[in-house]
Image (spheres, grey):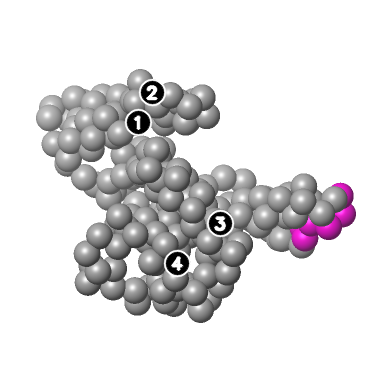
Amino acid sequence: MITKMLIEIFQALIQDPTVKKLLNSYDFTKKSDLDLETLMDDLDLSPDERAKFKAAYSEYQEDPYASYESYTYKYEPKSDSPFDKFDAYFQKFEDKAKATEEKYGAGTGDYRHRKYQKYRNSTHSGTYSDPTSPFSDEEKGHYTTLGLPIGATFEEIKAAYRDAMKKYHPDRFQEASQKKNAEERSIKINVAYDFFKKKFKQQGN
């Protein structure tokens, strides 16, 4: 059965603007028990696009949330900082160039994006910092790790921490790469929570 989460995964897979537009306007809720074959027929996908959809669907069935994150958030900036946005887009083009070389051989990848890296490095040595903000870059990063808006209350932080640990607990995963990713995320989540526990304790909360 097709879900809203699956539609978003498929949107992340497809480069064809026509298909993307169709997916954006596709009202799958009007079709009860919509299956993958019907969706692909409605979108008039090419054989290559059908193969991508089927692969994504199989991955989704194994672990919906891990699959969703791998497709949707791989190149999402860590924050609204222009430098974090640059890093996210840079990595996207870097991966694309490397994939091209793996497929067609050395020298075929397009690395023109690298010429802009010198501006990133020379303009700012670290993450952008707003001097008027009462929150440090470290603290902003911890809010991002927990998926919270900057300035969230400690009660909201505790709730987000519990939800995040349930989602990324390493014991939930069997596949090695997913387990490793979950372990790394769990460490970041715990570091963020420890930061806020100390901060709010000092404030007497």
Q: Are marks 4 and 1 in contact (CB under 8 Å)?
A: no
Q: Which residue is mark 1?
A: 168
Find residue 150 and report its horizontal and vertical position in percent: 28, 48
Tell me if residue 167 comes above or below residue 92 in the rendering: above
Task: Please tell me whether mark 4 sits on a helix, a strand or a loop.
Answer: helix
Of the residues under marks 4 and 2, which one precedes in the sequence?
4
Task: Please tell me whether mark 1 sits on a helix, a strand or a loop.
Answer: helix
Q: Which residue is mark 2?
A: 170
Residue at horizontal 41%, vertical 74%? 42
Q: Which residue is mark 3?
A: 51
Q: CA distance from mark 1 to mark 2?
A: 6 Å
Residue at horizontal 23%, vertical 26%? 197
Of the residues under marks 3 and 2, which one precedes in the sequence?
3
Which stretch appears magenta?
Answer: 106-111
Task: Please tell me whether mark 2 sits on a helix, a strand or a loop.
Answer: helix
- At label 3, the amino acid type is Ala
Q: CA distance from mark 4 to mark 3?
A: 10 Å
Q: Is residue 106 left or right of residue 38?
A: right
Q: Residues within 10 Å of mark 1 (few under 14, many from 20)?
A: many
Q: Which residue is mark 4?
A: 40
Q: Residues within 10 Å of mark 3 (few under 14, many from 20)?
A: few
